[in-house]
Amino acid sequence: MSELTKNYHREYISSLASPTRVSFQARAVNALTQLFKDVINIPFQGQFLDIGCGDGSFIIALELTGKFQTQGIDIDSNVDFEKDKLPYEDNQFDFTLMYSVIEHIFNPDQILKENHRILRKGQYLIIITPNIDQCGSLFYNDPTHIRPYNPVGLEKLMKMYNFEKTFLGLWTVGKSSFFWQLSSKTQFRLGSLIPFAGNNKFIPSFLKGKSETMFGVFKKI
């Protein structure tokens, strides 16, 4: 990863740092908790690693639930997600998260192998990323976006690294879990029609207006 990209990342993260971010990320934690409880039917708790943790607000929101032992890592830790081994033991985590991360990585081979290594068998990698089928050319409004994905491509990629799709659908917060019980095709169709977020300046642009983001839960096999 170039120094230019690293500097852009540092400046972006410093602009986000705010107690309000923790409150916003708590809504994301609640959404994931709801999904695992009502749709996947397993407890959302345990050893958790946030890969690309940014300002750490998601980790703080997780810790406030009292259900997780959390760690986070980002490029400021002098790790290159495309080349380096992550500093964790084999089979250490119950959940790993890549939240707005994979689209910034040109070659995801190493980071996906590392996710598989550090997860316990039968446990879960969560990926949240823009859906190129929904956002189109707007994906490239972020100059650090490199590699776009759609639901079909993401699922095929994960199969290559021995991850099995448990869930793949539209990323939303503050909605009923009934929405996620619809087919993925229906979710994405509705996401192109329904406004999912207001004008809160702390909400990333790809979460405002029409939902253009997908998320997947993939089980290590």
Image: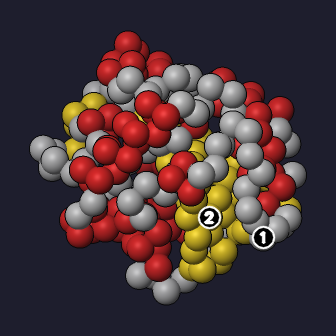
Q: Residue 92: which disc?
A: 1
In this view, the residue farthest toward the front is 3
Query: In which quadrant of the rendered view does residue 158 lie?
Result: top right
Q: Earlier in the sequence, mark 1 or mark 2?
A: 2
How far across and how far down the image is residue 155, in percent? 69, 32
**Circles 1, 2 touching at the beta carbon (< 8 Å):** yes
Q: CA distance from mark 1 to mark 2?
A: 9 Å
Towards the viewer: 159 or 11: 11
Count of numbered badges drawn on the protein: 2
Q: Secondary structure at mark 1?
A: loop
Between 129 and 197, the residue placed more toward the observer is: 129
Residue 212: mark in rendering: none
- Left or right relative to 59: residue 105: right
Q: Quadrant of the N terminus?
A: top right
Q: Which mark is residue 49?
A: 2
Crowd rating for badge 1 (residues with CA inside 10 Å; few <14, some 14–19, many 20+): some
Residue type indicated by callout 1: Gln
Please give left or right for residue 57 compared with residue 151 in the image: left
Give, as a three-letter code, the residue at label 2: Leu
| Dot 2 alpha-carbon crowd within 10 angstroms: few under 14, some 14 to 19, many 20 or more | many
Tell me which residue sits at (34%, 50%) in the image. Answer: 13
Q: Position of residue 203 (x, y in %)?
A: 25, 48
In front here: 168 or 48?
48
